[in-house]
Image: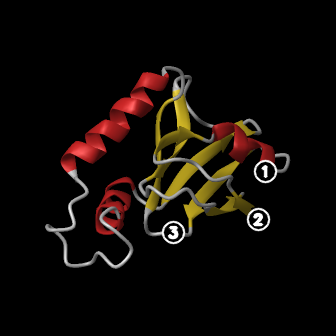
Amino acid sequence: MVYQTEVLLPPFKRGCHLITGIIQKQLPALPESGIVNIFIQHTSAGLTINENFDSSVREDMTNTFDRLIPDNIHLYSHNSEGEDDMPAHVKSTFTGTSLNIPITKHHLGLGVWQGIYLCEFRNQMQRRKIVLTILN
């Protein structure tokens, strides 16, 4: 069986944001086992799984991305949407655009300290669209 739905996230400021709760609220009753694929339909934001308890991890992740891949219009030829445009594309390549999470006993099979992050790499807040697909 395959189930699919789209989720329109609220706008988030630049940074790493825990969205596990938003995703879980959009899921139907999950089967005993299977896979949930989470796919973001954008090239300047990404998804990852990381620490779900200490918010300083999200801040450190954001700061690390910004140090490794700085906004600098002089480094990149693609800058039509501003100095954060090309760096956002590079960062989303590092995080990726999709996650596969196992379904175990009717729940997302995340570890105790794991959460789903939206990594917003643009300065301008915007709504992001995610496609959730359940396979069992």
Give residue 48's position: percent from left, percent from top: 46, 46
Mark 2 and 3 residues: CB-CB less than 8 Å, in contact? no
Q: Which mark is residue 5?
A: 2
Q: Which mark is residue 26?
A: 1
- The quadrant in which the C terminus is found is bottom right
Mark 2 and 1 residues: CB-CB less than 8 Å, in contact? yes
Residue at 77% x, 39% y is 106
Relative to 6, 73 lies left or right: left
Quarter holding residue 61: top left
Q: Earlier in the sequence, mark 1 or mark 3?
A: 1
Colour scheme: secondary structure
Q: Nearer the viewer, mark 2 or mark 3?
A: 3
Name the amino acid type tagged 3.
Answer: His
Name the amino acid type tagged 2.
Answer: Thr
Label 1 packing within 10 angstroms: few (<14), some (14-19), many (20+): few
Give residue 27's position: percent from left, percent from top: 78, 50
- The quadrant in which the N terminus is found is bottom right
Secondary element at image label 3: loop
Residue at 29% x, 75% y is 79
Give residue 47's position: percent from left, percent from top: 48, 52
Q: Which residue is mark 3?
A: 42
Q: Earlier in the sequence, mark 2 or mark 1?
A: 2
Decide if residue 132 is in sight here. Answer: yes
Q: CA distance from mark 2 to mark 3?
A: 16 Å
Secondary element at image label 1: helix
Relative to 66, 81 lies left or right: right
Q: CA distance from mark 1 to mark 3?
A: 19 Å
Question: Is the residue 80 above or below the residue 24 in the image?
Answer: below
Name the amino acid type tagged 1.
Answer: Gln
